[in-house]
Amino acid sequence: MKRNLWKRCAMALACCVLAAFPLTADAAQKELPTVNWAPNVFTVGETSDESLLSVPGTTGKVASAITERLETLSKAGKLPFALKTDSAAGDLQAVSDDTAISIQPFSVLDASFDSQMTVNGKNVYHALILSALDVSVVSRYEEDGKEEYRMLGMVPLHVAGEITQMTPITAQQKADKYAEITQAAIASDLDFSKNPKLFKNLEERMLSPDEDTWQVSDVAMSSKKAQTVYGSQQDKLRRLVAAFAAASFQQATSKTVLPSPIETGHYAKSVEANMNAFTISSALGKKTLTIPQAKHQIALDICGVNSGVMDEDKSDVLRHVMYKAWLRARPAQDAPGSSSEKTLDANKVVRESKTENVQFSSNPIDIYSALYIDLSTRIGSQVKAKK
């Protein structure tokens, strides 16, 4: 009896040991890849005087917010990778490529639209602050002395804020507002679980030529009136449209979206077959990323803006003005006017008044810019992506 009992125990133990092997194998298969984070924020393209990140102290505020958020997510077990923070240099501007996969935040838009309004005969200064930060997971592959980067996925954090005051708005005030709205977006929306497909199998995908990538390749401005309204700020509007449309498309489709040449300023031509290169900048200097060309491209067009008085009282004291904007999108390989082309419009009614005590008029740039944030976000989610 004791012998039979011993045999049963031995068999049960053997079964447990055998059963443990597949569990151990599964655990090994599910081991998370290591992703490096060296606190730094890059401006995509050349750093200009208008870049809000270039104002001293701004980059550090944004990088610190990303570090805090990543550590919070890591401690809660909500990251799809093992986080390795490189802080050995003790410098928020440190850049490290020690690991093959890293987090690289790209600011594709850190600018403001500046305007003035008239209230009671006095100037009121207004700034629409734009922040478009793509927190990207990037792989680095080196062979025969050549580096190649692949964008494996990104979390777009695109927000806007406003400053209105009676005195001219300084660059420091704009930068402080930019940091404030960007930090808030990082704390609330930097979440790698919203599009889990983008952050699966990172180590396998880093070498795969089959990554299905997209890009907003062009933002035309066929509207002559929009060109007149925006004047020297046309490029900012095109970058705004590219950034918000790309982010919306990525969120809606879970596709990997590459930085737009509209955002970067330009891509180097013919680096090598099917490859492009673009510059990113930080306080440490410039760095060139070489990435495969996007397999699919989207073309956008700022195709119209207009305004008109809806109604006006007899004394010409009060009137309502409607502002309207149009935006067009299509896959770049499709001809203009094809069935895949989509045009959206948006409008806003503004009340303007003029009496002995109150005078108020709006600046069209403020209104149209807000309309194009809305239009870009809407159209990005409606562009059809091939499966």
Image (spheres, rainbow, N blue to C red):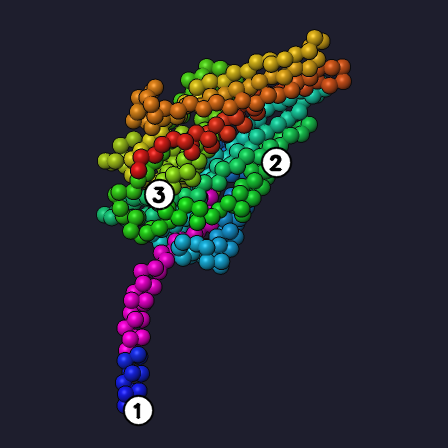
User: Residue at coordinates 54% horizontally, 27% vertically from top-left?
Assistant: 370
Q: Which residue corresponds to mark 2? A: 173
Name above or below for residue 221 compared with residue 205. Answer: above
Quadrant where the N terminus sits is bottom left
Residue furthest top as drawn: 314
Within 10 Å of disc 2 (Cα), the crowding (few <14, some 14-19, many 20+) is some
Marks 3 and 2, how far apart in space?
33 Å
Q: Is residue 30 magenta?
A: yes
Task: Check residue 181 for magenta coloring.
Answer: no
Quick one: 74 or 18, which is closer to the camera? 18
Q: Which residues are magenta?
A: 14-42
Look at the numbered disc 3 and give the secondary structure of its residue: strand
- Asked where in the image residue 170 lies, by quadrant, the reply is top right
| Numbered label attached to residue 2 | 1
Q: Amino acid at mark 1?
A: Lys
Residue 101 position (above or below residue 239):
below
Q: Are marks 3 and 2 in contact (CB under 8 Å)?
A: no
